[in-house]
Amino acid sequence: MPLTPLDIHNKSFSRGFRGYDEDEVNDFLDQIIKDYEALIREKKDLEQKIKNSDEKLSHFSNIETTLNKSILVAQETAEEVKQNANKEAKLIVMEAKKNADRIINEALEKSRKVTLNIEELKKEANVYRTRFQMLIEAQLELLKSDDWKSMSAGNDDDNAESPQKDDVIQSQA
C-alpha cells in the first residue's frame, strides 16, 4: 500500500548520537509531503479527466454507431425507393404501350369500318345511279313513244288510257 502524506507527516525517526539534524529532516519531510499531496491531487484530477474522456468517447462511439446504422438504413431505403421507382416506371411504360396498342387497334378497326361504309355507300350510289338512269331512260322512251304523240293530238280514247300509263310510269319508278 502506497504512503499517504499523513503517513509521511507522522513518521518519526529514532534519535541517535550524532544523528541527522532534526530541523533539516523535518523541512525535507514537509517538502516531500507537499510534493506528494500535489502528485496525488494531480493523479485524481487526471483520473477524473480520463473518466470524463472515456464517458465522452463512449457517448460519441454510441452516436457514431447510431449514425452508421442510420446511414445504412437510409441507403437501404434509398435503394428500395429506387427499385420501386424503376418497377413503377416499367409498369407505366408497359401500360402506356398496351394503351397505345389498344388505341392503334381501335383506330385501325374504325378505319376498316369507315372504309367498308364508304365502299357500301359507293355501291348504293352506283345502284341508285343505275336505277335513276333506267328511270330517266324509261321516261325518255315513254316520251318518244307513239302513245305520247297521240295524247298530245287530243284523242279522248287516249285520255282514257292515260291513267293506265300513269300506273306504268309509277311502277317503273
Image (cartoon, grey):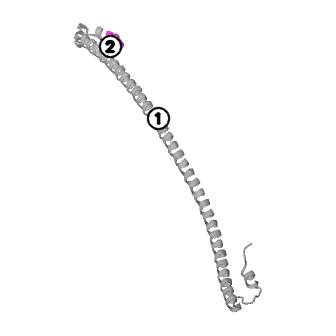
In the rendered view, does 133 fall on the left or right side of 113? left
Q: Residue at x 25, y 10 (%)?
A: 141
| Whether residue 48 is situated above or below residue 166 in the rendered picture | below
Quadrant of the rendered image containing residue 20: bottom right
**Residue 131 pos. (x, y %):** 31, 15
Q: Main secondary structure of the magenta part?
A: helix
**Residue 84 pos. (x, y %):** 52, 43
Quadrant of the rendered image containing residue 10: bottom right
Q: Quadrant of the C terminus?
A: top left
Q: Residue at x 34, y 18 (%)?
A: 123
Q: Quadrant of the N terminus?
A: bottom right
Q: Which residues are magenta?
A: 159-171
| Whether residue 106 is situated above or below residue 35 in the rendered picture | above
| Whether residue 45 is situated above or below residue 105 in the rendered picture | below
Q: Amino acid at mark 2?
A: Ile
Q: Residue at x 48, y 41 (%)?
A: 86
Q: Which residue is mark 2?
A: 169
Q: Which residue is mark 1?
A: 94
Q: In terms of depth relative to the viewer, which is nearer, 132 or 169?
A: 132
